[in-house]
Every structure is written in structure tokens, then in C-alpha cells.
Amino acid sequence: MGGTGMTLARTLLATVALAALAAPASAVTYAFTLSKGLAGRWELPASPVPDADYGDAFRINSVSGTLNGTSFTSFMEFFGSNSGGGVCAGFTCRLFDLYGPQLYTGTSAAPTFKLGTFAMLDATGRPRATLRINALPEPGSWAMMIAGFGLVGAGLRRRRATATA
């Protein structure tokens, strides 16, 4: 690498190092997305600390998201397989009440959500929605990806400048 390319590479590496040091260590966040019958989205930690533990279910208070285009903040309850599985939200589950598989591993006192796509049913057993749970990239991952694109761009630019010289 020449002088300008080397300076750019050093600058990018310094930026990545600072971003990695500045980014606080945080728990992995999962995105929950409802489709095919209901349209909704909210985010929760991969391994939340429940606000209430019922033995085969747990509650998380103050979950914010959207449902069918409307914002909400409510509690959510996640049920174990002995309680029918699934999730509900709102007082007496008025926002939604979805039955299906148990959406977490571990105990209801220390759950970890499962990743994947799940068919959710209504109380009568009819298909109601599809729930997808996926991990969101952490800020440090984004910084590394952007720095990588910058280094590739710098290399291509240097290569092009050398070819025309």
C-alpha cells in the first residue's frame, strides 16, 4: 500500500478499534415478527429476566412494539408446553393470544428464547399467525462490517490508481 492507502487503512482500523472499545457489552437482542394473519414486531433480550415466574410460564412487563400498525406497550406472557405453549399480550391477553410451541428453552425463571419460525394458533386451534424470532446484529458487528467494506473499497481504489499510472 502506498502512503494514502496506508493512511486510510490505519484510520479505518483505528475507527474499528475505537468503536469496539466504545460499544458497551450488551445482551443479544432478538426481534419477534408476526405475519400471516397478524402484523407485529417487538424486541426482547435473548435471555430476559422475567418480572413474574409462574412455574410453566413467565411475564415480561413494559414490552413496546407494533401490532397491525398501532404502537403498544404492554406485558407479555410466554407459556411452557404444559400450559399450551405460545405467547399473549395485554390485560387478559386482549392484544393477542397465540398458542403453539414453547418459545423458550431453560426454565421459566431463567428462559432463553428459541430462534426460528413458528406457526401460531388461536384458541380454537386454527392458524392465526406466523412468529419469527431472529437475532439482531450488535453495534460492534455493524462497525466491523462497515470497516471491512471501507478496506475493500480502499484496496479497489488503490488497485485502480496503480493500473492507470
Image (cartoon, grey):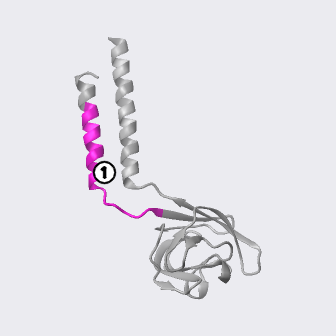
What secondary structure do most residues of the magenta stretch adopt? helix
164 drawn magenta: no
| Residue at the image position 51 percent from the left and 82 percent from the top | 59
Residue 155 in the image, given as x and y percentages of width and height: 36, 26
Q: Amino acid at mark 1?
A: Ala
Residue 88 in the image, given as x and y percentages of width and height: 60, 79
Figure check: 107 above or below 30:
below
Q: Residue furthest top?
A: 165
- Is 47 displayed left or right of 80 in the figure? left
Residue 50 in the image, given as x and y percentages of width and height: 47, 80
**Which quadrant: the N terminus?**
top left
Q: Quadrant of residue 117?
A: bottom right
Density class for disc 1 (Cα within 10 Å; few <14, some 14-19, many ≥20) is: some
**Which quadrant: the C terminus?**
top left
Q: Quadrant of residue 35?
A: bottom right
- Residue labelled with disc 1: 20
| Residue at the image position 23 percent from the left and 30 percent from the top | 7
9 drawn magenta: yes
The span picked out in magenta is 8-29
- Is 46 displayed left or right of 17 in the figure? right
Figure check: 15 above or below 92:
above
Residue 119 in the image, given as x and y percentages of width and height: 69, 67
| Residue at the image position 55 percent from the left and 59 percent from the top | 134
Q: Quadrant of residue 33?
A: bottom right
- Mark count: 1
Figure check: 2 above or below 131:
above
Circle 1 — which element?
helix
Q: Nearer the viewer, residue 110 or 158?
A: 110
| Residue at the image position 59 percent from the left and 83 percent from the top | 56
